[in-house]
Amino acid sequence: MTDYEQIDFTPLLSLSDDEVVTHSRVRDVTLPSGAILALITLDNGRDHTRPNTLGPRTLIELGERLDELKTRAAAGEIDAVAVTGKQYILAAGADLSDITLVGSKENARKVAQLGHHVLGRLSDLGVPTFAFVNGLALGGGLEIALNSTYRTVDASAAAIALPEVFLGIIPGWGGAYLLPNLIGIENALEVVISNPLKQNRMLKPAQAYDLGIVDAIFPASNYLEDSLRWADGVLSGAVKVERRNEPGRIERMTKWPIAVKMARGMLESKIGTVPAAPYAALELLDRARSGTREEGFAREDEALAELVTGDQFAASMYAFDLVQKRAKRPVGAPDKALAKKVTKVGVIGAGLMASQFALLFVRKLQVPVLITDLDQARVDKGIAYIHEEIGKLEAKGRLDADAANRLRALVHGTVDKSEYADCDFVIEAVFEEVGVKQQVFGEIEKIVAPDAILATNTSSLSVEEIGSTLDHPERLVGFHFFNPVAVMPLIEIVKTPKTSDDALSTAFVVAKGLGKNAVLTADAPGFVVNRLLAKVMGEAARAVYEGTPLLTVEKAFQPLGLPMTPFQLIDLVGWKVAAHVQDTMAAAFPERFFASENFHRLAELDRVVEKDKSGRVTGWTKGAEKVLKGAVGDTPASESDILRRVQDGLAQEIHVMLEEDVVPAVEDIDLCLILGAGWPFIDGGASPYLDREGASERVFGDTFHHPVIVGIGE
C-alpha cells in the first residue's frame, strides 16, 4: 500500500503560488457533559462569494493542525474533533485552477495522494471526528465529511454533491470508496455518476440526510449549537447513530454487481463509450465492495492521475472557465452605475411563462410585482399558480411562513393597466407575434415613466422591429429566458442599434439579481441558442422528410452529447413553438435552414411522438404517421451522414455569427450553448467539438481555436 508519509509533496507548492489559502482555525469547545471538542473552522478570509477551496497549501496546513490534534488526543486533552466552515460554506472542493497546472502525471497523482493523506487522517486521530456541514459541500468538501466518523448538515445548506464526473474526473479523495460503503451502491451511483450527468444536479440537505450521507439535520437558526449538543450525545452514548443504507454482506454479493451492470448499460445507451470519467468512476464504485480503504484510495490515486492529464479534462476546464469567469463578467455589459434602480416590476401576461417570470422576480428581487392579462379570470389563474408555488417552497422548508406571506403580498394581479405607472422594469410574455408585442408595448409606453425599461422575452423575433413603433425605442431590450425559467441559468440580453446603455445596464443588473448568467447578443434571428438549436432540429426534420426512420435520426445525434435528442427537445418546447422558430430561421436564412409545412400539421396534433417512462422517443403516434404518410421521401440518410451534416451546419452557422458580430467572441457562443442548451462540459463546448471533428476545416478551412482544444475522441 502507498505510504503517504514518505511522499514529497513540495513540488505541488510551486503550482500554487496564487492559491487563496483556506486556513484551519482551531478552538476548543466544552460540551454540556464537560467533554472537550476541538473545532476546526475552514476560512479563506474572503466573503461568502469566494468559497473555501482546497489547494495544496490549504491541505498541508490542515494536515499540520490534524497532526497537532492527534498528539493532544493521545495526551487525553481532547475527546473529539469537528470540522466546519465559514458562514454558508464548508468547502467547494479542490482548487481547480491549481489542478489545471499540474502538468505531469506524477504531479497529478500527488494531488490525489495529498488529499488522501490529509483527509484520511480524520479517521485516524484516536478520537471520534465530526463534520458539521454548515453550507456548500462539493467534491473535496463532501469528502472531508465522508472521511469523518459522523456528519450533521445545516437544513439551509446550498448544495451537497460530488460533481467530478461532470468535469471529466472522479471523486479522488475518498469519495468513490467511502460513499458506496456508507449508503449502498445504488445510492452512490446516483450521487457519483447519474447526478453529474444530469447537468450537474446537486443534493439538497434533506436529500443527503435521506440517503444516509449525513447522520443528522438541524435548522440554520441554531445549527452549530444543535450539532455540538448532538455530538455530545453521540460521545456519551445517549444518541445512537443508525446507518440504515449501509450495505450488508448480501447486498455486496448480489445487488452490487447487478446495479453496476445496469449502470454500465445505461451509460452506454445514453453517452456512448468514449467519455472516460463516468466509466472510471463506475469501475471504482464496483471495486469498492471489497478490499481495504487503503486499496480503494490507491485506486483513486491512479484513476485521478490518468484523467487529470487526459484530453477530456482539458476540454472540461475550458468550459468550466467560461462558466466560472466569463459568465460572471459579461463581455459588452455597460457600467453597472448606469443601471436604473428597480423598485417595482411589471409582467405583461398571466399565462404559465408570465407567472414563472413573476415568481422569479418576486423571489429574487423581493420587490412588488404586477401581472395583468385580458380578463380577470386569467389574472386570477396566474396569481393562484404563483401562490401555489410559494406554498410548495414553504412546505419543503425553503421558506418560512413569514417569508412566504411576504412574497405573496408582493404579487398583485389586475386588468387595470394604469397600475404599470410606477413600474421601473416591464417585461412581456405574450403571443410570439410582432404585431401583438408592438400593440402591448404601445399601450404600456403611454403609462410608464419616461425612463422605465421595457423588455421582450421573444425567442426569435427582431427586437428592433418590435420596438419600431415605440416613441422611445432606446428603452427596449431583449431579455430572453429559457424554460424552465427557475432552473435554466442563461438569459440572452439583446441589444438593438437603438438600445441605450442605461437600458442595457439595467438589464444586466436585473439578470444578476435574478441569479442568472447573462450574455450580450446582437439583434439577429434566433439570437444564439435558438438559432443553433433550430439548425439541429431542422437537420433532424430534413432527415425524416428524406425517409429516414425516426429512431435512426434520434440515434445519429447522440455523439453531440446534448441532454435531449432533437425530437425529445421539440416535444419539450412544443411543436407549435418549434415550427414557429423554424419558420423564422428559414425566412431569415432560406439557404441554410430547413422548414416544412408538415411541421405545422404535426403541431396541430395532441401528441406527435410516443415516449417510454424515461422520456426516450420510441416512435410516431398514429396521428403523426397519418400526417407523414406520403409526405416523406425514399432516400433515407445514414447516421454518419446526418451527424456530418449537423456538424457542418453548426460550424457554418457559428462562423457566420462571428462574422456578423452576433456575439463578441466564439467563447460567448460556447457559453450560451453550455448554459442554455446543456452542451456537455466534457466536450468543452460546441466550437472545440466541431474543431476536433474536422467540421470547422471542412466548412471554412480553419479552426475556431488555435491550438485546437482537445477532448472527447482525441
Image (tube, helix red, strand yellow):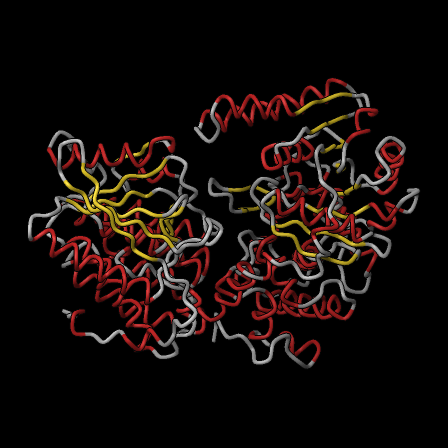
Q: Residue 217, how many percent across, how many down?
A: 31, 34
Q: Residue at x 48, y 66 (%)?
A: 317
**Residue toward you, 630 or 495:** 495
Q: How many marks?
A: 0
Residue 32 visible, this orientation: yes
Quadrant in which the N terminus appears: bottom left
**Residue toward you, 606 or 471:** 471
Q: Residue at x 46, y 55 (%)?
A: 270
Q: Is residue 352 rendered to the left or right of residue 591?
A: left
Q: Residue at x 36, y 64 (%)?
A: 55
Q: Is residue 250 rendered to the left or right of residue 282?
A: left
Q: Is residue 89 rendered to the left or right of residue 517?
A: left
**Quarter of the rendering containing residue 239:** top left
**Residue toward you, 596 or 217:** 217
**Quarter of the rendering containing residue 417:** top right
Q: Residue 483, how many percent across, how many down?
A: 62, 43
Q: Residue 647, how many percent across, how many down?
A: 63, 68
Residue 556 visible, this orientation: no
Q: Residue 403, how many percent across, how many down?
A: 52, 26
Looking at the image, residue 150 lies above or below residue 176: above
**Residue toward you, 246 or 422:** 422
